[in-house]
Image: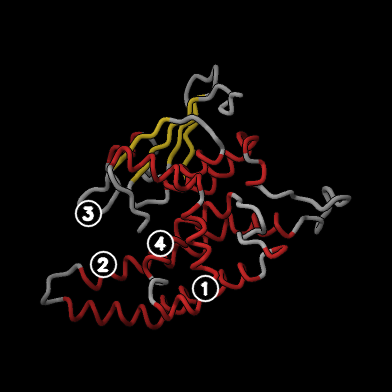
Amino acid sequence: MDNNQGCKITLYWLEQSRSHRILWLLEELKLEYELKIFKRRADKLAPAELKEVHPLGKSPVITIQAPGATKPLVLAESGAIVEYLCDHFSSARPTLVPQRYTPGSEGKVGGETEEWMRYRYFMHYVEGSLMPFLVMTLVNDSIRNAPPFFVRPITSIVASQVENQFLTRNVEGNLAFLEDQLRTSPEGGQYICGKELTAADILLSFPVIAVTMRVLKEEKNKERYPLLVEYANRLERNEGYQRAVKKIEEIEGKFSASM
């Protein structure tokens, strides 16, 4: 069976980036693909070569060369890539997108299943609500640590103020929200939308695993967010995730999920 439908798929993968989620999804969908690896520059930014693929020069980016098409389709933004791949290639893993309607309520407003409503929400929540605070935390840390040592006391004070008055409460608020969402997962499921792994879990994997390595490694936080810690570990143990990690290790010799 040709899951690719004759299409040639290329993933432009950047180290320590959100692109690993797309690699995992390709593995889950059992698709054949070409993997092109890019390294970050000394300033931690993406290399200029990525702009040859997409004008913003960011990762993830994929190209899909369909049979008979004169030029490849170029897709950027994690959520858009995930939705497009699931729309066209999900036959190998149809449960990555939950059933939309309850029986007899097809097409009716409010007739959606809880699993699908969660799925639709989290597909937007990850990049719209969660990731901005985590990125701001990284930027704030760089403000604290990057300047020359004689300026650092001043930048450290500024960074601490931003952290105390804005970042900490928002990051903790999101962690508490995710902990509660896991606690109330439909039918006692172990994933964010219920009993089955969905594409929303794959999108959540990067920030959740990164937060686990950064914040939840402290004992006090493990006690505050036990379900979130278990969830991160569960995602890392997933066979598709492990296959994606192995692909990178075979090329690069190592893999890091940190931001």
Residue 72, image x and y in percent?
47, 26
Helix, strand or loop at disc 2?
Answer: helix
3D distance between C-alphas at marks 2 and 1: 29 Å
Residue 131, image x and y in percent?
45, 62
Quarter the N terminus occupies? top right
Can you tell which of label 3 and label 1 is closer to the viewer?
A: 1
In the picture of the structure, the residue carrying the numbered disc 4 is 210
Above or below, 100 against 216 in this view is: above
Helix, strand or loop at disc 4?
Answer: helix
Specify whether residue 88 is in view. Answer: yes
Specify whether residue 55 is in view. Answer: no
In the picture of the structure, the residue carrying the numbered disc 1 is 226
Q: What amino acid type should be assigned to the residue bearing mark 4?
A: Ala
**Which residue is depicted at the point 35% across and 34% down?**
36
Helix, strand or loop at disc 1?
Answer: helix
In the picture of the structure, the residue carrying the numbered disc 2 is 142
